[in-house]
Amino acid sequence: MYQFSFSFSEFLSTYWQKQPTVIKGGLTDFVDPISPDELAGLAMEAEVDSRYVARQGEQWQVEQGPLTFENLPEDHWSFMVQAANHWHTGAARLVKPFRQMPGWLFDDLMISYSTPGGGVGPHFDQYDVFIIQGSGKRRWRVGPKKDNYEECFRHPSLRQITGFDPIIDEVLEAGDILYIPAGFPHDGYALENAMSYSMGFRSPKKQELLSSFADFVIENEMGDEHYHNPDLPARENYGEVPVAEAEDLISMMRSLMDDPEAMQQWLGEYLSLSRHEMDIISADPLWTPSELADLLLQGETLFKIGGLRAFYHQGKPGTVYVDGECYHLPSGCETAADWLCNQDSFSVADMGPLIEHQTLLPLLTKFVNMGYWHPAE
């Protein structure tokens, strides 16, 4: 079980989205949750997002997965697996200490393996990241946040910058954590064969929110009405848009966001939709509610698949949002939102009397048949 050696609340008040910092020994007695060979195995799978980055002098090479690992140079290369927590249960356990952060902000856990000199060059990201050092040592440099860093294009797949003067220059060892807020340039390279774990938290942009809401409005056929003004006055200036009419049009748009229920549904669906592939395997044969109840009563536990996003709004646990869809819990089953959204698994001990609820069981069975929850393998 991974545990922090520091107060996460104090970290948030002092550093979160304010300044980068290194926390030496941030995770106590750290042991890699995955081996390099296991990580390489994931990178060879077509469903898994991976890439290989190598450097020879000023020449950079980038390959997108699935990777083959043939004819590798001796050093100065890395490979990375995105959303490793979706595919490896051991890697997923590393996420647990970070659940003091909002689940809707969490993006994924990226894991990289690097040989001496391996890295992706100086760059900056538009998300907040905690980089946990695993086995081996890696040197990290972090610069100040500025608007005038010059991009350089050493490879079309790498968005690098020319360089920076570091405000942090540290060698990380197993269990050390480097926190880098969005927009701070950084550059890391391995001093020896090394594993690194990048916990990414991605804030949505205004553009993304607006685009998603517009799609929601269209899909749900909201606001399908024209501008209506029976008191339209005659005018002298044909090309002029009167203030009152401009305000009417803007008000039409704003009225779409004045429906609290619609806004909550859109936000729940938007935030629960995963940005990465998941290891979803639909049940075959399909379970029936009675079969699932018998399984749970026999002491079986149902586990949520890695990376599945499930949320509910504060004070409204009667509706849960799972992987971009809205589901209404039966009346009296609101406590199910806790073990569906806040826990990695649930059993009859969590369900209590709800194990006999004849309306809830079909919904749980639907989740299992879709592959969102599954019995122990």
Image (tube, rainbow, N blue to C red):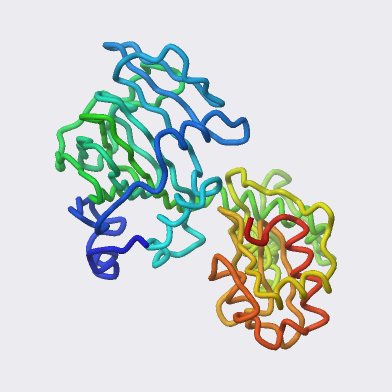
Residue at image x 40%, y 43%? 126
* Quarter that holds the C terminus: bottom right
Instruction: Please state if 282 lies on the left or on the right of 199 as rendered.
Output: right
Q: Position of residue 299 (x, y in %)?
A: 65, 74
Instruction: Note whether 242 is above or below 8 in the view shown.
Output: above
Foreground residue among 135 and 377: 377
Instruction: Note whether 118 is above or below 291 in the view shown.
Output: above
Residue 62, by quadrant, is: top left
Q: Position of residue 129 (x, y in %)?
A: 35, 48
Residue 238, by quadrant, is: top right
Instruction: Please state if 101 lies on the left or on the right of 258 as rendered.
Output: left
Foreground residue among 352 and 167: 352
Foreground residue among 103 and 42: 42
Q: Position of residue 235 (x, y in %)?
A: 75, 54
Q: Position of residue 1 (x, y in %)?
A: 37, 62
Residue at image x 20%, y 29%? 191
Residue at image x 29%, y 12%? 58
Foreground residue among 30 and 249: 30
Residue 328, by quadrant, is: bottom right
Residue at image x 72%, y 65%? 326
Please indicate, yes or no, whether residue 316 appears anywhere in the rendered image: no
Instruction: Note whether 287 is above or below 218 in the view shown.
Output: below
